[in-house]
Amino acid sequence: MTDAMIGLVALPLTGAVATLLLPRSATVVAIGAGLATTIAAALLLFGVANQGALHYEMGGWSTGLGITLRADGLSALLLMMTSLVALAASVYASAYFSAASERARFWPLWLLLWTSLNALFLSGDLFNLYVTLELLGLSAVALATLGGKRAAAEAALRYLLVGLLGSMLFLAGVSLIYAGYGTLDLATLPRVVEPGPIAWTALAMMTTGLLLKTALFPLHFWLPPAHASAPAPVSAVLSALVVKAAFYLVLRLWLDVFANVVTPVAANLLGLLGACAVLWGSWRALQAERLKLLAAWSTVAQLGYLFLFFPLLLALPPGPTRDLAAGGLVMLALTHGFAKAGLFLAIGVIQQRCGHDTIRDLDGTAQHLPATTFAIALAGVALIGLPPSGAFLGKWQLLAGAVETGQWLWLVVTATGSLLAAAYIFRVLGHAFGHQPYPNQPVTVAREEWPALLLTAMAALVLGLGGAPVWKLLEIGT
């Protein structure tokens, strides 16, 4: 299975180079590289499920001297989600970008971003995490500029500055860790990190840098304009995957590397910021006039739910209840990734077919674009947290953990956020099922509508009905 680990980085990187050298065949090359990468992700997931956590020391160098790749249940799940979302968005992008010049700029950056995501999830030490995080941010910013308008350029510049600040803070924390403990290996650090000024300062700096990249309230100011101005396939990946990469690092730091350092006060602070994100993001989504802005503000809110789990996981003792809560957190993250990617792709279809994404002017969309409207409805099921979606399972474990630990505030926040999500989703659907007539014509499902349908179906149905393996995979640690 080490071949699959190497392939997850080498295949999209090779594809990126090939699209630069063969611009006329860039689409075919990119889709082929995407298919191969997805197969490698599936093989790795199968290998982790059957053999346990995997690691590979590149070049034969021992840990600490060379680059080590590691894969456990969590990273394998995120790699699989990344591949499925990126592949679906790639198929969508092949029809979205019509001009040859657009495709020539898009595909190399797209595959470089995919490479960075895979390398980040496989990295086994803090310095390589920094390198992949920086590559991910730069490629994401470059892709965000492809919107071609002044607003897109301004939003991308703000995104770049925020990303660089976040990376600098993360790197400063990494430097402190190396100076204090002499190692950056993720498997070694939990055994040597102890409470003290070095650990507290490093954790604070690294977490702040990552929260900037995750866009947790009140550091979310850059996300709505950046996601709303980017091309639809780029918005889908930014919302579904790029911010998840930063959250993944927060999760690793707090639950693995600094598990002996974090305190209930710090965890409750993250929980309060998450609660503010849920309420403020949902309220702004309800007020949004454009579909893409609604989806972007919804991302702010949905990320907030993930941070509500931190005070619960710190308060719960090791055992089945804590394992269920951790599984609920990952299930919620996976569901949001698929649902939000599908939602942005569906919005892109509406923009191209209707020439706008203004919510109040969507009357008749359900009649004209039934498959796209159905995809939005499925995404809504997942974002609200209705059964049988994976988000329902995640929120159920969130509520169960809050009751178990007596943290009642999170119950109120979750219920309020879900009601607000229902309000903004039904607002969109209410306009889509309006009565503006369209000419009688055969209705077919276009190629660019299938990716949105498949991703939202994954979030609303597949994860909810077949989510049990998620908890089993999370038992496999590094």
Image (cartoon, rainbow, N blue to C red):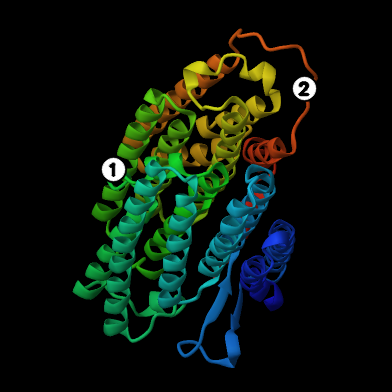
Q: Quadrant of the N terminus?
A: bottom right
- Residue 407 in view in this figure: no
Kindly identify which numbered label has been placed on residue 123.
none
Instruction: Decide: is 364 above or below 9.
Output: above
Three-letter amino acid code at the position of disc 2: Val
Label 1 belongs to which residue?
272
Label 2 belongs to which residue?
443
Q: Which of 321 and 268 is in front in this view?
A: 268
Look at discs 1 and 2 and give the one toward the viewer.
2
Query: Picture coordinates of residue 351 (x, y %)?
Result: 56, 31
Instruction: Decide: is 411 above or below 125.
Output: above
Q: Is residue 388 left or right of residue 324?
A: right
Q: Earlier in the sequence, mark 1 or mark 2?
A: 1
SS for dot 1: helix
Three-letter amino acid code at the position of disc 1: Leu
Crowding at dot 1, Cα within 10 Å, few <14 / some 14-19 / many 20+, comes out as many
Q: Nearer the viewer, residue 344 or 51?
A: 344
Query: Picture coordinates of residue 360 (x, y %)?
Result: 48, 17
- Residue 417 in view in this figure: yes
Query: Picture coordinates of residue 378 (x, y %)?
Result: 62, 30
Name the residue at 26% across, 49% down.
269
**Which of the 4 quarters of the picture holds residue 3?**
bottom right
Instruction: Decide: is 221 above or below 65.
Output: above
Name the residue at 51% across, 17% down.
361
Q: Is residue 204 left or right of residue 240?
A: left
Q: In which quarter of the image is the C terminus?
A: bottom right
